Every structure is written in C-alpha cells, then in structure tokens.
Image: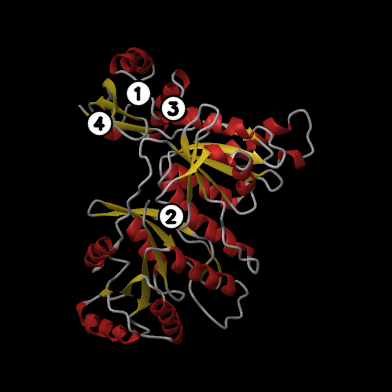
C-alpha cells in the first residue's frame, strides 16, 4: 500500500508551491475564494527511489467570513487523520500566528509523524529565524524555500526515512480488484450483492488495513481478492468533506490494486469527483472497469446508453479504451458482468506479445506511416519489443527518439490496441535510442 504525505498549514504559506516542487509538476491550484485553495490536488512524488502520494490541502483558518473556510478546515483534519506523514508548512517572514498555533495543537495531539517546513527561507540570514518555530513543540524542522528548492533535499531525505514500511500477508498471486467511487455511488450495494448471500464461500484474509477490507472471492470459477472501500466515515454536516475523504481512501486502495472497478452514479453523471478518481487510476497505471450504477432509475430512449458512454469517454480522452457497464446493484442487474470484465482487463494487463509478432505487425505500418520529420531529420524505427513490466510497456528503438511527438505515440498505441486486446489497461509507449 502506498504512503500518503499531506501538506497542511494556514493560507498563503506556499503549500501549493511545495506541492508542485515535490510532484515536479506545474499544476496550478484553483483559487476561487480569497486565495484559498478549494480544488484538491493529488500527485505522485519520488525521492531516493521511494514513491509516495502527496495531497495538497486548503489553508487552515478559523473565524473567517468565507463560508468555504469551514469545509476546508474539516478537509485538513481529514487529511491529518489519513496521512502517514504531515508536512506542516509555515512562513518564516510572518512568524508564528494564531492559525499556526491552532494547527500545531492539533498535530501534537495526533500520533503522527510531523515535519515542520519553514518556508520562504530564501537566504542564509533567515535560517536562524526558522528555529523560532521549535517553540510550537514539534521536533522535526527544516528551513526551506519551496520556490527555489533550497533545503527541500534534506527535508525529503528525512521524510522518506520517516515513511512507514508497509507489508501484506495476503496471497500475492491473487489479482486484486478494488471497488472505488465517490460516496453514495452504490459501492456498498454492489459488494453486498456480490458476497452477501453466500458467505460460506467468501474467505476474509489477514492483513486487512483500516481503510480497505480484503475478501477472497472464489465462486463461479473466479478466484481473486475483492477490495471493499465502501466503508466511508459519514460526515453529514459537509458533503464536500465526505467526497474528499473518499479520495483519500481511494488513493491507498488504487495503489495496491490490479484492476479498479469505478462506480459512478447514473443519476448524477460523470462529475468532477469521478474524474479525479479516474485520473488517479490512470496515473497509477491500473486497469479500469467503469460501472454506471443506478441505471434502473434513468428514463431511457433508444440511444440513452450509447450517448451516455460517448459523453463519458469524451471527458476522459485521450484514454477511451475501457469497458463501460450499465448496472443496478440493488436490482442485481449485470453485476456479475462487471467481475467478468474485471477478469478480462486483468488478463489484458498481463498480456505478453512476442517480439517477432510485434515487428511483423508494426514495422510495415511504420514504414507506410513514419513519424513526421523534425528539423529536416528523419526518424527511423528499427524494431519494437515489449519490456517486462507490471503494465503493457513497449519500447520502440530508433535513431532520434527525442523527436517523436505525442500524436505519434498515440498513433502506435491505437494500432497496438486495435490488433491486440488491451481494453481497460493504460499502456506505456517508449522511444529509445538504438
């Protein structure tokens, strides 16, 4: 299971800048309410060979006139509960504020690993001022500058040593199918429909984490681990908190799965929260099956399902090659087809293609449709092979790999998908120097 690092702190201390640096991205934080981050962003980071997820939270504030502040504050508290390590960002220029004290008091009460990142230490003269933040009672402190990277290396060295080592006792040979989705999409109903009636053939396994329940599903000729993430803590007061909490849980479950069964609510459509979870699945290179649940509640015409599917694929483009199943968990309509599709996707994810077959099929196509010339230089692809990897990964060896652009990557990927079945599986296309 992957580790989660949450970045917390009051508004405008540089949390988003630090997030972008850790994830090596330029993803801007949506700012719609007085400088407060409202759109939650999740990213992957790696340091010294250790990978972990990073969650950027909004600014913790109290007694604000902004009606969004209460929801943001609750989301920060959720992040603190769920994260393995907390990066508590403060501002060396403004010093310790009442908001900083409020956050530090919360963190001291939690049995969590906390690192104070004293931000905006842009020169050596400010380093002694950073030590003043030790007075908040948290021992691990690093002066950094998120904007230029100063000090972040030492902080990350300490962070990756602090991350817990997570192991599992479940059978590693069994595929893991994880049911994910936003609250009230029907995850619990699906799980109950699949395993609730014949529990004698469902075996609970050890190694269960507090956010996922691993159940061995071995009926109708199938044998895999079904991961239930339906047990979401209820936060009735603020619905947005519940959705944020579901994504925190989904991060962990997705990272430890082979195939994700993403459930969406047909009555609400494919909303922003669904898209975030879908992006997490794709970013983690996991297989995906999309279940459009509560289809029995939709008024249908002749092309309702087809139009819904086309709209959904348009929203996830350019990744559109995945199965979509219209189900009703309460009516038990096509719920077992979802498992059959998950098994197929797992097989697609594990598919190996011989080098001779790849070259016999692709080289004539590449000869007829070569990569566009760049700066008067022609790209010649010599041969193709599949690399050993957890997801289908194909290496195209050529003379000028740096000149191959994204449209041509998609072109050869589509050819591979058309000739071999990789439905539901993200694919890696690499161009390497021969």
Identify the element where label 2 is drawn.
loop
Identify the element where label 1 is drawn.
loop
Residue corresponding to mark 1: 352
Residue corresponding to mark 4: 432
Q: Where is residue 427 in the image (x, y as percent from the top left)?
A: 40, 33
Tell me where residue 45 sits by quadrant: bottom left
Structural distance between the alpha carbons of marks 2 and 3: 28 Å
Q: Residue at x 61, y 49 (%)?
A: 188
Structural distance between the alpha carbons of marks 4 and 1: 20 Å
Q: Where is residue 409 in the image (x, y as percent from the top left)?
A: 38, 30
Crowding at dot 1, Cα within 10 Å, few <14 / some 14-19 / many 20+, comes out as some
Pick the front one: 388 or 217: 217
Tags 4 and 1 in contact by the CB under 8 Å rule?
no
Pick the front one: 204 or 6: 204
| Mark nearer the N terminus (2 vs 3) | 2
Q: Where is residue 418 in the image (x, y as percent from the top left)?
A: 47, 20
Q: Which residue is drawn at 78% across and 34% down?
A: 300
Structural distance between the alpha carbons of marks 1 and 2: 32 Å
**Taking the image as drawn, is residue 44 in sight?**
yes
**Taking the image as drawn, is residue 317 in sight?**
no
Q: Where is residue 6 in the image (x, y as percent from the top left)?
A: 41, 64
Tell me where residue 136 sits by quadrant: bottom left
Residue corresponding to mark 2: 209
Residue corresponding to mark 3: 348
Structural distance between the alpha carbons of marks 3 and 1: 9 Å
Q: Residue at x 39, y 35 (%)?
A: 406
Of labels 1 and 2, the one closer to you? 2
Tags 3 and 4 in contact by the CB under 8 Å rule?
no
| Mark nearer the N terminus (4 vs 1) | 1
Tags 2 and 4 in contact by the CB under 8 Å rule?
no
């Amino acid at each position: 299971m992957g580790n989660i690092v949450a970045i917390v702190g009051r508004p405008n201390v540089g949390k988003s800048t630090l997030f972008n640096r850790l994830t090596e991205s330029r993803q801007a934080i949506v700012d719609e309410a007085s400088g407060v981050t409202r759109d939650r962003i999740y990213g992957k980071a790696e340091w010294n060979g250790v990978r972990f997820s990073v969650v950027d939270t909004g600014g913790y504030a109290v007694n604000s006139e902004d009606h969004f502040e209460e929801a943001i504050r609750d989301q920060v508290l959720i992040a603190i509960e769920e994260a393995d390590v907390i990066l508590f960002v403060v501002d060396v220029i403004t010093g310790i504020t009442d908001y900083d004290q409020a956050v530090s008091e919360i963190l001291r009460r939690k049995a969590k690993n906390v690192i104070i990142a004293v931000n905006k230490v842009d020169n050596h003269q400010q380093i002694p001022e950073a030590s003043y933040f030790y007075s908040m009672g948290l021992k691990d402190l690093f002066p950094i500058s998120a904007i230029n990277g100063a000090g972040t290396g030492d902080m990350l060295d300490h962070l990756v040593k602090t991350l817990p080592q997570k192991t599992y006792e479940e059978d590693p040979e069994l595929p893991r199918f994880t049911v994910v989705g936003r609250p009230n999409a029907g995850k619990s109903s699906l799980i109950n429909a699949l395993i609730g009636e014949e529990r004698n053939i469902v075996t609970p396994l050890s190694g269960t984490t507090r956010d996922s329940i691993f159940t061995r599903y071995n009926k109708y000729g199938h044998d895999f681990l079904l991961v239930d993430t339906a047990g979401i803590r209820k936060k009735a007061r603020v619905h947005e908190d519940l959705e944020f909490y579901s994504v925190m849980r989904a991060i962990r479950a997705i990272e430890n799965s082979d195939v994700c069964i993403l459930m969406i609510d047909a009555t609400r459509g494919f909303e922003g929260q669904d898209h975030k979870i879908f992006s997490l699945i794709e970013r983690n290179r996991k297989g995906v099956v999309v279940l459009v649940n509560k289809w029995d509640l939709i008024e249908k015409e002749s092309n309702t399902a087809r139009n819904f599917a086309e709209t959904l694929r348009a929203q996830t483009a350019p990744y559109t090659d995945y199965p979509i199943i219209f189900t009703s968990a309460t009516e038990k309509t096509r719920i077992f087809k979802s498992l059959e599709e998950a098994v197929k996707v797992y097989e697609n994810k594990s598919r190996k293609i011989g080098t001779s077959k790849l070259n016999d099929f692709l080289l004539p196509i590449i000869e007829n449709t070569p990569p566009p010339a760049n700066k008067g230089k022609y790209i010649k692809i010599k041969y193709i092979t599949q690399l050993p990897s957890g997801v289908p990964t194909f290496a195209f060896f050529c003379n000028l790999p740096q000149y191959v652009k994204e449209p041509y990557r998609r072109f050869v990927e589509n050819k591979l998908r058309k000739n071999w079945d990789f439905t539901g599986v993200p694919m890696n296309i690499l161009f390497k120097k021969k």
